[in-house]
Amino acid sequence: MNLTVYAARKLEGEVVVPGDKSISHRAAIFGAVAKGTTRIENFLRAGDTRSTLRCLEQMGAKIYDDGNIIQIEGGVLPLRGQTLDCGNSGTTMRLLMGILAGREGESTLIGDASLSKRPMDRVRIPLEMMGAQITGAGDKNTPPITISGAQLVGREYSSPVASAQIKSAILLAGLQADGVTSVIEPSLSRDHTEQMLPAFGVEVKRDSLRVEVSHSELRATQVHVPGDVSSAAFFWCAAALRPGWKVRVNGVGLNPTRTGVIDVLQTMGAQIEIENQSESGGEMRGDVTVIGASLKSTRIDGALIPRLIDELPILALVATQCEGETVIADARELRVKESDRIAILSAELRKLGAQIEEREDGMKICGPTKLTGAIVTSPHGDHRIAMTLMGAGLIAQGETTIENADAIQSSFPNFPDLLAQISR
């Protein structure tokens, strides 16, 4: 599917974004393991999360969706000899690796062409250290991944990178292991797992960058998923592109491990208003308005990176409109997402006239730069590249055509419609 975007005279309005993808994945997986019936409100219905639901149903969970609330009857025990298709979802695969590592029987996790190139050794290695037997392709680093469940033994693991998927997989395995399991990160990654597990009856101990669990059974609960920060970021950043543009996103999650994009936009000079804050299930939410202004360059690196790793593509676009040189560093993880986001985003934005220097762990972007419409593409089913390029089309002279834009279906199916509604 190709989409054509025309330069906007103004961007203004209010939107409600779909439920948070990271939280939706976890609510479904925890609910499938937990004893009893879990009810999930505002669950994200998109390609990646549907992959999770399909896998859980195949594993034995009974899932009912009336269009408003999803109910999951849990207590899942994987069947022997299963092949579970995770589609394009790395979160599905990595979190299920943690579940399957401690369950009886053998299962194989597969994915689409893009997911089949993504490394799984960061999860495989600590799970094998706990006792699981795991094999994969490409020297065991890429899918398909076959897991033979075992009686696991808890241990302390120092992760070489800050990754919520790695941390969550190990903690999920730890809930089935003998003894104590702990993860130490070099900097704090998303903490949705740690926030949600207590609602399912699990004691979680946290001390700075260390998080610990012991063998526990999950109990069903009710989860209300806040709006997705990563989806909201595309509207916030679009508003920041031009002085006077204004977008309000209502009911969006405000977990501090996810709001690095707001911090960066403020540093760049955008005006931010946060209202109607509330808390539910350990997760903050609120209404966030961004008003565009004259922007200045900044540096995005270090401990900030895990708090906005998925928002870096759209922030790179904002950087093209900042005065001066913006540097994104310590973001090598972008090379092993749905695509090599450093290489591809640099190449595609340069087609529009952006001045971007690709670096091994990030980018150097000089601005402000006038963009001109062109034909660009989002290869390998990368939804965030596609949405970033749509944002670029709003400020590019003429028309911008995004090829392979159907990748957006994996996380935000109605993004093009919502963007059109607030564009003038």
Image (spheres, helix red, strand yellow):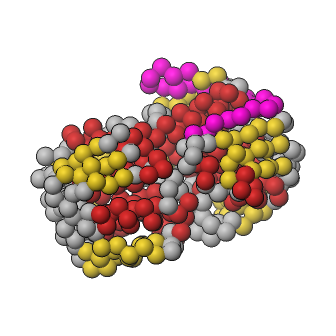
Picture residue at 23% right of the left edge, 48% below the top: 5
Please state the extent of the stretch shown in magenta in the rendering: 64-87
Q: Is residue 239 left or right of residue 254?
A: left
The quarter of the picture where residue 293 lies is bottom left
Q: Is residue 19 left or right of residue 371?
A: right
Residue 25 locus on image (x, y percent): 56, 40
Residue 421 is at least partly visible in this image: yes
Residue 382 locus on image (x, y percent): 45, 50
Residue 62 locus on image (x, y percent): 64, 22
In the picture, which quadrant includes the N terminus? top left
Question: 75 or 112, which is in the foreground?
Answer: 112
The quarter of the picture where residue 408 lies is top left
Q: Residue furthest front?
A: 375
Picture residue at 61% right of the left edge, 53% below the top: 117
Question: 148 or 66, which is in the foreground?
Answer: 148
Picture residue at 21% right of the left edge, 64% below the top: 371
108 in magenta: no
Question: 312 or 114, which is in the foreground?
Answer: 114
Q: Residue furthest bottom?
A: 324
Q: Compared to 419, does 243 lie above or below?
A: below
80 in magenta: yes
Residue 212 is at least partly visible in this image: no
Q: Compared to 56, does 326 lie above or below?
A: below
